[in-house]
Image (tube, rainbow, N blue to C red):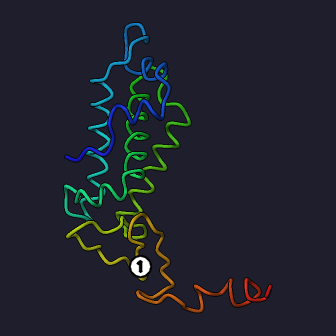
Amino acid sequence: MSSYASIKDVQLRYPTRLLAQLTDEEAGKTMEPTRIQKALDDACAEIDSYLGSQFTLPLDPVMVATNQSLLTRLTVDMAVFRLMSFRTQGATEDARLRYEDAIKTLEKINKGSLTLGPGAGQSLIPAQGGAAVAGGVAAVDPGIQPNTVFSDRAMAGYLRGGLWSQL
């Protein structure tokens, strides 16, 4: 299983007080790193279940490094949602929305409408009708044929009433 985020990544994105409340069942005052790590492991496993249909797992280290910010954000949001969902009050609305956004992003990667940039020795799965931008996540426009940079559809805003009309 891959690890896309650390406990430190969680601490950088969420206040320590909240993490203590989510992980310390007795007093809610001390952050329990083992509970956070378990939530991170669960989130990474779920992410791998989506990525595994498009990429060889574990992901190439270069691909992980290229997409570290995205993978870390998705992992942390999913892990915190899991921590919140185990509390008696249930997950907060914000955590649920972040989790759902993470799942939508993973579903897009799974379907090929978003893709991770290629890593060393790993080629991209061809996305339907579009091309990926190396070095990050890129949206794929199904109306643009692969390897076509200047199509009528891609240039519509520039040629008709767009940038060119202002010159």
Residue 131: x, y in percent?
41, 79
Taking the view exactly as shown, the residue that stands out farthest to the front is: 167
Residue 46 horizontal/vertical position (percent): 30, 47
Task: Tell which residue pokes out farthest to the right in this image.
Answer: 166
- Residue 10 picture quarter: top left
Q: Is residue 88 above or below residue 48?
A: above
Q: Is the residue 101 above or below the residue 92 in the image?
A: below
The foreground one among 95 and 34 is 34
Which residue is the site of mark 1? 131
State the residue at coordinates (43%, 23%). Answer: 19
**Residue 4 position within the rendered picture, expressed as x and y whole percent measured from the top left:** 31, 46
23 lies left or right of 124 = right
Looking at the rendered structure, the secondary structure element under dot 1 is: loop
Answer with the quarter of the image where residue 86 lies: top left
Q: Residue at 38% x, 46% y: name it.
A: 72
Query: Could you say where residue 99 lies in the image, as x and y percent from the top left?
Result: 45, 43
Q: Quadrant of the C terminus?
A: bottom right
Within 10 Å of disc 1 (Cα), the crowding (few <14, some 14-19, many 20+) is: many
Instruction: Work out which residue is located at the far top of the displayed protein and give it.
Output: 27
How many numbered marks are there? Answer: 1
- Residue at coordinates 44% horizontally, 57% vertically from top-left? 105
Closer to the camera in the image, 33 or 128? 33
Q: In this view, does 123 lie above or below 35?
A: below
Residue type for callout 1: Ala
Residue at left offset 38%, top offset 67%: 115
